[in-house]
Image: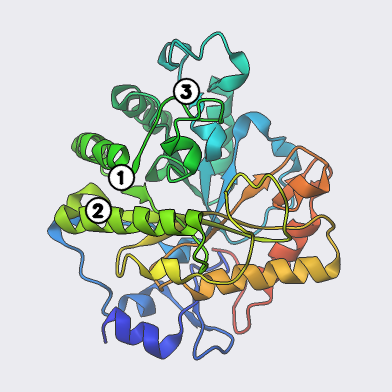
Amino acid sequence: MNIKTASAMLSPLILTTGLLGLLAVFVSGAWPQILTADELSAYDLPPTPAARSLPVLNPAKGIIVNLRPAYTDFSKLQPWIEGIGYIRVWGGSRGMATYPALESVPPALRPQRTRFNVIRDEEIEQLLRLQREHPIEFIYLLNINDSVKSQKAFVQQLLDAGLNIAMLELGNEIYLRKFSDGDIKGLGVTRRITIEDYIGIMRDWVPELRRHFRIPVYVCAAGHGPEARPADEERRRWNLRIKTELERDPTLADGVTFHRYGGEERTGNPHEETISNKGFAFTQTFGDWPIAVTESGYQFSDPTPENLERAAEFWTAFLRALKPTDVFGIHVMYNRSDAVSDSSFGLYGSKGITPTGERFARWLRELPNSTRGDR
């Protein structure tokens, strides 16, 4: 059975309990069966070209959650939500303005202190402590506004410190119009980056990273809606160009990342999309290439039971669009703001676990036929 046949038969949905390394797959739209890692390996998964020989993220490990160490009260991350397998660190638009040292910051930015962050040693120590306490691995967002030499040296510093890095992600949402317009007022924008510029970055950075690390590199694909709006059309063109380049040279990535948000309509949406939970067909663009959803979320203004159920439906809808080899992630583990519009995405806040976090933990526990216990 190949992956396309399996997909057609199973209507796959990846849900991981994070316990006992179990992988849940929806069968014909019903609630999931539980597949162990050994059972998953029995599928004829897509062949990995010699050029794509690195291991990719493991969906049986758990879900991806974003965390910014400098903004996190680590004491609030209790009780720990089982099912978190990967932590994406220094991510998002702020990650594109985060540098390993002051000398790495572009000179034009240095007088504008609010436009960048420099990573402190204590942030790395906090991540190491988190790693000691929980069975997690890390995804590091490569800041492509920095030099490949600087980013490569910082990845080595993290590895030398003992951080388990499972994936390197080549930039954050570079398909946004603020990059193609070169809007340097936008957070994380230091110059104009078009799709062809990004292809050039792939060609320059990925071979260099491969020479020094055996860590998979995922490149930035664009989530979009089914509508024929200009932003959606731009993102379709972005994806097709990335796909064409990977067909030309499959050594330029080990997988692709997607972001997608849903929820109530709101103005000033930084993701330039009409927020809707309809349409995840973009996940099919890259065929058998592994996918990591490194951000997703459901926006609401009030954590009512109805809105929390809609959020759970959004998570499920997104998961239904993924292959058994893909890994799902949500927006953020900790949000220090008490504003409801911000905390709707966060699993934890200044008072501990949020209503979103409680619903998410229950969503994981509600998976039928799962067996809970120590890993």
Q: In the picture, which quadrant includes the N terminus? A: bottom left
- Give the residue type that dot 3 points to: Tyr
The CA span between labels 2 and 3 is 27 Å
77 left or right, relative to 10: right
Q: Residue at x 71, y 49 (%)?
A: 346
Image marks 1 and 2: residues in contact by CB distance under 8 Å: yes
Q: Which residue is mark 2?
A: 54
Q: Which residue is mark 1?
A: 215
27 left or right, relative to 113: left
Q: Which residue is mark 3?
A: 99
Q: Residue at x 20, y 70 (%)?
A: 47
Q: Residue at x 65, y 47 (%)?
A: 269
Q: Residue at x 39, y 59 (%)?
A: 236
**Quarter of the figure with residue 286:** bottom left
**Quarter of the figure with residue 375:** bottom right
107 left or right, relative to 135: left
In the image, 132 versus 220, the foreground residue is: 220
